[in-house]
Image (cartoon, rainbow, N blue to C red):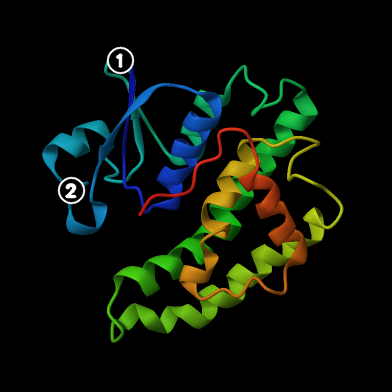
Amino acid sequence: MMTVHGMAISGNCYKLRLLFEQLGLPHRWVEVDSVHGETRTPEFLAKNPNGRVPVLELEDGRTLSESNAILCYLADDTPFLPADRWQRAKVMQWLFFEQYSHEPYVAVARFIRLFLSADHPRRTELPRLLERGHQALAVMEQHLADHAFLAGPAWSIADIALYAYTHSAADGGFDLSDYPAINAWMERARVQPGFVAQGR
């Protein structure tokens, strides 16, 4: 059985939990508190020298890190990662967008607001994070105004990757009321077979 080393409140870890449930894949979850240093122990660093969750550990002991790489591994040969060359590339396009244009702003703002004190120096980053995060959300809104899903006619790991932090964007101070297409897409997400809400 595969093992996920992750933190339930992390959007990057939630991606994996959601895909595991939607694929109906049995797995073991090991909760790792990265906020309080559990990703810096020698035991964890042996699994991922970068000291971050999530980590997927296979039965033979091999490990894989980086949430979107794990999504691709798990989704291979399933409808969540299309076999068609063009559709597959569109999935990858949105996965890269999530990591470079969305997560660094939406997720980081969430982290600062949830985990850092009100007087923490990093609070000064929030205005810029909100500005850049809204730019990413606007790109999604424009696309979803004419498409039911991000990378094609069906739900895929592109949607899973971007749902993970978009659905909790309010934690980072983002008001999603001006994004009707995103809100409609999130409703479609919640009725996908095997959908599971994020743990806390």
As rendered, which of 177 and 161 lies closer to the eye? 177
- The kind of secondary structure element at disc 2 is loop
In the picture of the structure, the residue carrying the numbered disc 1 is: 59
Q: Position of residue 179 (x, y in %)?
A: 72, 68
Residue drawn at x 77%, y 22% as measured from the top left: 84
Instruction: Give the amino acid at mark 1.
Output: Glu
Instruction: Give the amino acid at mark 2.
Output: Glu
- The kind of secondary structure element at disc 1 is loop
Query: Badge 2 local density, few (<14 within 10 Å), some, or many (20+)?
Result: some
As rendered, which of 109 and 97 lies closer to the eye? 109
Quadrant for the C terminus, please. Answer: bottom left
As rendered, which of 65 and 33 lies closer to the eye? 33
59 versus 97 height, above or below = above
> Would residue 168 be found to the left or right of residue 3 on screen?
right
Residue found farthest to the left? 42
In the picture of the structure, the residue carrying the numbered disc 2 is: 38
Q: Position of residue 146 (x, y in %)?
A: 87, 53
Residue drawn at x 72%, y 66% as measured from the top left: 138
Residue found farthest to the top? 60
Q: Gap in Å between the C-alphas at discs 2 and 1?
A: 22 Å
Residue found farthest to the right? 146
> Would residue 120 be found to the left or right of residue 66 on screen?
left
> Would residue 93 be found to the left or right of residue 127 on screen?
right
Residue drawn at x 73%, y 45% as measured from the top left: 150
Residue 181 appears in which quarter of the rendering?
bottom right
Residue 140 seen anywhere in this rendered image of the structure: no
Which of pointers 2 and 1 lies earlier in the amino acid sequence? 2
Q: Position of residue 66 (x, y in %)?
A: 43, 39
Q: Position of residue 8 (x, y in %)?
A: 35, 48
Quadrant for the N terminus, please. Answer: top left
Residue drawn at x 56%, y 33% as measured from the top left: 194
Query: Badge 1 local density, few (<14 within 10 Å), some, or many (20+)?
Result: few
